[in-house]
Image: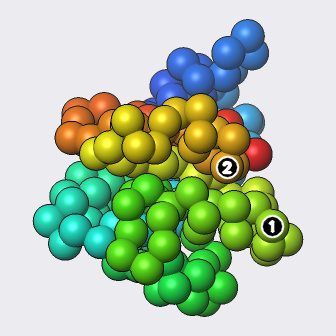
Amino acid sequence: MRRVRDQADRHQGAAGAGRAVATTPGNRQKLNSDWRTTINILAVEDNPLHLKLVHVVLSAAGHHVSGARAASQAMESINREKPEMIIVDLSLPDTDGLTLVRKLRSDPRATKIPVLAVTFYPERYSREQAIAAGCDAYLVKPISTRTLPDLVKRVAAAGR
């Protein structure tokens, strides 16, 4: 338990830009309540191998990942599971990811959920289109297993 607290303290010290963080026993409880290690993520991806890759990498980083293989499944999962972040492939079988993101942004229950857009087709789905549709970040596949967990943390921390 002490090791986890020490990691939380280091994380707060590094991530608290411009804010001094003292690690005294008196404020350790406040630091631990502000610091979150687990993010509930919904990954919307029609390719089972890519879905599994995202699940394995982010689960290993301590996050809870659920998956949806189509936009219709994603909407059901969002209403049921209340994810804290969504990773959406922009090429889906029943609709494109940009349409899904626009639908999310018009839904009051999902408007504040950060969205990371991923695509194999940057010529078809540009960063500008993704941001205009309401995505908070954009990533071109192939996904780097080394950088994905940090990118997820940054996007989730920035929130909406």
- Residue 41 in percent (x, y) is at 48, 64
Q: Say which of 81 and 106 sits in front.
A: 106
Residue 27 placement (x, y as % from top left) = 73, 35
Give neighbour class at mark 2: few <14, some 14-19, many 20+ (Cα, 10 Å): some
In the picture, the quarter occupied by the C terminus is: top right
Identify residue for label 2: 133
Q: Looking at this rendering, what residue extends furthest in the left direction? A: 49
- Looking at the image, tell me whether mark 1 or mark 2 is earlier in sequence order: 1
Residue in the image at 49% along x and 25% along y: 10
> Is residue 159 visible to us here?
no
* Kind of residue sitting beneath label 1: Ser
Position of 98 relative to 30 (above/below): below
Dot 1 corresponds to which residue? 106
Q: Quadrant of residue 145?
A: top left
Mark sitting on residue 145: none
Residue drawn at x 75%, y 61% as measured from the top left = 105
Left or right side of 87 for 57: left
Q: Amino acid at mark 2?
A: Ala
Residue 18 in the image, given as x and y percentages of width and height:
73, 10
Question: In what element is the residue under mark 1?
Answer: helix
Q: Nearer the viewer, residue 15 or 44?
A: 44
Name the residue: 69% across, 49% down: 134
Image point 81% across, 67% down: which residue?
106
